[in-house]
Image (cartoon, rainbow, N blue to C red):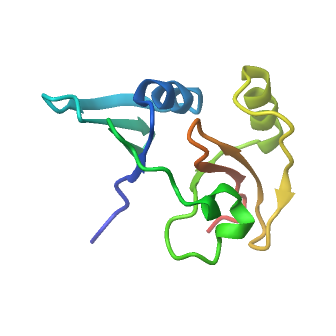
Amino acid sequence: MLNFHHVALSVSDIQRSIAFYEQLGFKTVMDWKAEDNSLSIVQLKNGEAMLELFCYDSPQVAPQSSAELGSDLQRIGVKHVGLKCDYIEETKAELEARGVASDIQITRGRTGIDYFFIRDPDGIFVEIVQDDRGL
């Protein structure tokens, strides 16, 4: 039987990304750095969810199509990271108060959940959801 383990993200500044994801409740559980400093890998956990951050000394910029969520949905590949909260209004207010994001708009999705998107320091979409469907 397989269970979910992690999502991997490539980032441009490992410390800036760690600080961002710590604001979302993640804690560093492992870090590794190549002897020549060409690559850093950090794993962060929040409950059972784990993120694995890769930071290369010469990162490649994502294609322009990934800059907007709606324009990138048809391209094959990972679209965003989703995090669940209990109370979306409270979570929205807390993230705005911390300066993590501003002008957050909560939407009712086609799948029946309330959600909003924020972006990490590299523009990677992070979806915050309140899912009371009991699935």
From the viewer's side, name the closer residue of 37 and 105.
37
Q: Residue 73, relative to residue 7: is it above or below?
A: below
Residue, x 75% and y 33% (percent of image)? 101
In this figure, what is the number of numbered marks?
Answer: 0
From the viewer's side, name the closer residue of 113 and 43.
43
Residue, x 22% and y 29% (percent of image)? 37
Residue, x 12% and y 28% (percent of image)? 35
Q: Quadrant of residue 20?
A: top right
Q: Quadrant of residue 14?
A: top left
Expressed as whole percent of the image width and height from the top left, the position of residue 75 reads: 57, 75
Q: Residue furthest left?
A: 35
Tell me the quadrant of the picture where the C terminus can be found: bottom right
Q: Residue 40, relative to residue 48: is it above or below?
A: above
Left or right side of 60 for 73: right
Q: Residue 109, relative to residue 119: is it above or below?
A: below
Expressed as whole percent of the image width and height from the top left, the position of residue 118 reads: 70, 44
Expressed as whole percent of the image width and height from the top left, the position of residue 41 reads: 29, 37
Q: Residue 115, relative to residue 73: is it above or below?
A: above
Q: Quadrant of residue 96?
A: top right
Tell me the quadrant of the picture where the N terminus can be found: bottom left
Residue, x 70% and y 52% (percent of image)? 129
From the viewer's side, name the closer residue of 117 and 15.
15
Left or right side of 119 for 7: left
